[in-house]
Amino acid sequence: MLATKSGVKASKPREKVPEYLIYEIIDGKPIHYKGYREVLAGKKTFSDIMGSSGIQSLIVAYFQRILFKALDEEHYTIFSSESGLHLDRRNNLAGDILIFKNEILPIENIDEHYVEVPPKIVIEVDITADENDIENQPYLITKTQKLLDFGVEKVIWVLTKNKKITVATPDADWQIKDWDKDVEILDGIICNVGEYLRQKGSSFA
């Protein structure tokens, strides 16, 4: 409500945010793409905020190459490009790389809808969401715990700004490592982001 000289009148309703700016749903609340306010203000376009940076894309491709070489397609399916996960009616999440056991996600259950079973591993490169949409604790912690509660066995976050990797599992303390340390993805498959970038000659190494 707004106070005026002549009394009180109804406040102007808040502008509805278009659905295409919603990145995920957590506990029934929309989580928007980072930078969506600039889109609403006309300072950026949607394509400006939804695309991955060059370094993010390079790191995702690095993981994909490792996994496609090491994992048997008869036993594993690998999704990428912000694949959707439907946890329940109040939670829809997205992931950069999702690794599924085929016995959990058989080919006949892959269709035009979000996947409704937990991947074995989730790998995320940086945070795509507007972290201000989460109030009680950091977005990374909230999303990671949701995934672990859903049945994901390991969640790996690569943070390019800090050059850190977070590894979370349900039955152990979460680890934070420098990204030039070896990290096991699964089944003895090792990644080392910092070493890879150095070998490529990247200034981010």
Image (cartoon, rainbow, N blue to C red):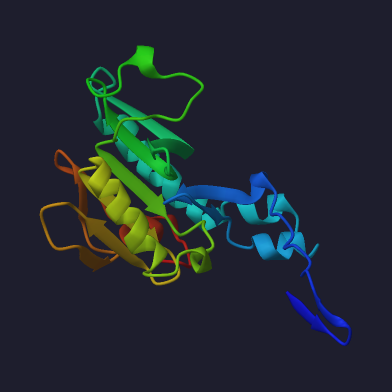
Left or right of 48 in this view: 90: left
Residue 20 on image: x %, y %: 66, 45
Residue furthest front as drawn: 7
Residue reaching furthest to the right? 6
Query: Residue farthest to the bottom?
Result: 5
Residue 80 in view here:
yes
- Residue 14 drawn above or below residue 99: below
Return the x and y of residue 134 as percentages of the image width and height.
Answer: 45, 64
The image quarter in which residue 68 lies: top left
Where does the C terminus fall, quadrant-wise?
Answer: bottom left
Between residues 196 and 48, which one lies in front from this camera angle? 48
The residue under the point 72% across, 63% down is 14
> Is 15 situated above or below 59?
below
Viewer-closest of 43 and 143: 143
Q: Give the residue at x 40% y 29%.
A: 115
Q: Position of residue 72 (x, y in %)?
A: 24, 23
Outermost residue to the left: 171
Number of callouts: 0
Residue at the image point whose x is 31% and y is 30% from the top? 117
Tell me the quarter of the picture where residue 183 sits. Answer: bottom left
Q: Whole-percent x and y of residue 196? A: 35, 55
